[in-house]
Image: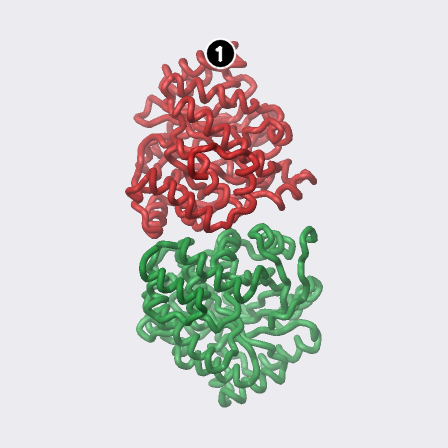
Chain colours: A red, B green
Amino acid sequence: MAGGAVPTEGEIARLLREAPLFELGRAADAVRRSLHPDGAVTYIVDRNINYTNICVCGCSFCAFYRDRSAPDAYMLSEESLSKKIEETLSLGGTQVLLQGGLHPDWGIGEAERLVRAVKRHPIRLHGFSPPEVWHFANRSGLTIREVIARLIAAGLDSIPGGGAEILDDEVRARISPRKIGWEQWAAVMREAHRQGLRTSATMMFGSVEAPESIARHLLRVRALQDDTGGFSSFIPWTFQPGNTALSGDPGFGKSAAAGFGHAVGYLRVLAVSRLLLPNVRTVQVSWVTMGAKVAQLGLFFGANDFGSTMIEENVVASAGVAFRMSEEEIVATIRDAGFRPSKREGPPCST
Amino acid sequence: MEAALRTIRDKVFAGDRLSEEDALALFRTRDILSVGEMADFANRRKNGDQVYFIVNRHINPTNICVNRCQFCAFSKAKGEPLAYTMTMEEVLRRAEEASFQKATELHIVGGLHPDLPFDFYLLLLRTLRERFPAMHIQAFTAVEIDYFSRIAGLALDEVILRLKEAGLGSLPGGGAEIFAPEIRNRICPEKISGDRWLEVMEAVHAAGLRSNATMLYGHVETLESRVDHMRRLRELQDRTGGFQSFIPLAFHPKNTQIAKGYTTGLEDLLSLAVGRLYLDNFAHIKSFWIMVGPKLAQVSLHFGVDDIDGTVVEEHITHAAGAQAGQEMTVSELVTTIRQAGRAPVERDTLYNVVREWPEGRA
C-alpha cells in the first residue's frame, strides 16, 4: 500500500478478503492519525428530513419508497417542514439533511421552493443527492450545471453523497436499475465541486456486490477526488435488508453470506476505505446501521467522524433498524475511546 | 505500543501468567488493537478457529425474589402487578418446545421465591429429567443454591447432592456480580457475599459438577475491583478446575436503581479480552450476544472470545433492563455470524462436547 502506486482492483479485493483484521486496523489507524494527529473526532447535531417517500426509482434495496397511490405515501407540507427545522434549532441543531424520493412531478421549481423554505431559517442545508439533482434536470429540461447553479442561488450549502450505492453499473443494474449510473453520479459531483459546493461520498455495501466492485467504487471516488478535491468525507455503510424486495431475492442470500454486510466485514471495509482514500480528509462511522458499540470501534479502524445525532431518521428506520444516540451519548462514546469530541457545524458533510 | 503493553505481550506470547497489575494496565489502555491481537493469539492457541454455540432455551420460572439488588430490573415482590411464577405445566411446555427445536440444554434461573419449598425444585428437576432425558439441565446460580440450603435447613453439600441426584447437570455462573464487599454492599447488599459465592462454587465443583463464572461490569465498580474479582476466580479455578467459561456481563441500566449509561463497545471488548488474557486457566470466554448485541458479539470473536452462547429463545432478565437485542438467534443466524467472522462454527453441548460441526456451505 505504501509507496505511492495506486493498488489494483484485485489487490484491494484481496485486502478486503484476506488481510488480517488487526493489520488492516493498524494501517488505517496510521492514516487517520497522520490526517488528524490531534485525536479529534467530529460530529454534528442535525436532522434528516425526507420531503417525500414517493419515488419512481423503486430500488430493490430500499424499504422507504412508496408509489404515489400507496396509503402511506406522503409529501411534507411547508408547515411541518418549518416545525421540524424549528425543533432542530431548539435542540442545538445546525444543519438539515434534506433528501427525498424521485417524485414524478418534481422539477427545479419545486426543489427551489423547498430550499427557500428551509433557508428562511438560520440553518445549513445539506441536500439533494445526485439522483435527485439528475431527476430535477430531467423533469425541467435543464442541464446539471443549471440545476446546481439554481439550487446554490436558492441557498443550498452542500450535497450529500447518497445514491452512490456501489459505483459499478453491473451492481446497479441488479439493485437499482432505474437509478442513474455511476458516471452520472460522478458527473453531478464533479459539477457541484466545480461550482464550489462541498459534497460527501457514500457507499452502500453488503447487498450483492463482490469485493472487486467495492474496490472499483473506492478507486472511482479516489480518482474523482484527485481531480476536484471536493469530497469532504466518505461514509460507507451496510445494506439493511429489512422490508426490502432485495432481501427476498434468492440470489441475495448467497451474496450476503459471502459479503461484507456484517460487523466484522464493516470494520474491514471501513479500514480499506481509509487506506484507499488518503485524499479524503474524513471517514465517518455509521452508528445508524452498526450501533454505537461497533461504531465506537470504527474509530480504531480509520474513522474520525461520528456523523450526526440524527434527530430524525426515516430511511434506515424503515428497514427495521432502530439504533438511537443523543449528543451526550455520542460525546461520551468518543471520549471513552480516548478521542477528543469536537462538534462541527458544516462539512465534513453528515451523510 | 505502550511499554506496559509490550511487557504483557511478551508474557502472552511466552505463555506466562499475567499479574493483577498487567490486568489493570489492559483495562486502562485505549490501544484496543494491541489488546485484541494478544487476546486473539491467546484464544487461538487454545481453541484454534473454533467458535462454539449451543442450542438452548432459557426458562425463568419466577421473578419473585426476596432480594432487591440495585442493578436488577427483573425481580418483583410477591403481589406486585408483574410478579409471576410459572406452574409446572408452563415450565414443561417450554421444555417441550425446546426439545422439538433439538435443544441440548435447558438454562433455568429464577428469583429467590419466599414460599416455594426446596422440594419444588427437586420435583422440577426430576420431572424435566424424566420427560426430557436428552436435555442437559444447567440451573440455579450459587445464590439460589445458598438460598435452598437456608430454606431447607440443609448443609451445602447435602443440597448439591440432592439436586444432582434429581437431575441437575451443571451450574450457570450468575450471581457473582463483583465480589469486592465495598462494591457488592452498594449494588446488592442482601445477596450472598463474594466469599460465599466462591464457597458454593467450590462445593459444586467438589461434587463433580461444572459451572460457569460471570462478572457484572459497567455499574459502580472500579477497575481494581474487576481485577480483584478475576483474581479470585483464577485462584479458585487453580484449585478446582471446575469452571468451564468466563462470561463478563454488561450492566443494563433501564428500570434499575443505578443511574448509568449503557456500556460502550470498548468496555465490552476489554472485559472479554482481559478475561481471555488474565484467566489463563479458563478454556472458554463467552460473549453473551443478548448482552452486547449480535454485532459486537461477532466482533468479539477477534478479541479472545470462542463462545457466543446460544439460541436462548426467551430472555427476561436482561431485557427487563433494556437489552436491545432480540430474544432469539436461530442456528442459521449463529452459524452465519460465526462464519462471516472468519471462524469455524461448532455446535456444542453444555459440557463442550461437539454436537455438530458446520462445514462451509451448510448453514
Q: Is mark 1 on a helix, strand or loop?
A: loop
- Work out whether residue B200 or residue A21 is closer to the camera in this orientation and state it: A21
Name the chain under label 1.
A
Task: Determine whether B261 is above or below A152 in the image.
Answer: below
Query: At 44% across and 20% down in the image, what residue appears?
Result: A190
What residue is disc 1 on? A143
Q: Is residue B129 left or right of residue A160?
A: right
Q: Where is residue B105 in the image (x, y as percent from the top left)?
A: 63, 69
Comparing B310 with A40, the one in front is A40
Viewer-proximal residue among A124 and B332: B332
Residue A307 visible to the viewer = yes
The structure residue drawn at horizontal position 45% and vertical position 13%, both measured from the top left corner, is A145
Q: From this view, report whether residue A290 is shown above or below residue B68.
A: above
Residue found at the far front of this picture: A3
Quarter-of-image position of residue B121? bottom right
Q: Where is residue B167 in the image (x, y as percent from the top left)?
A: 63, 80
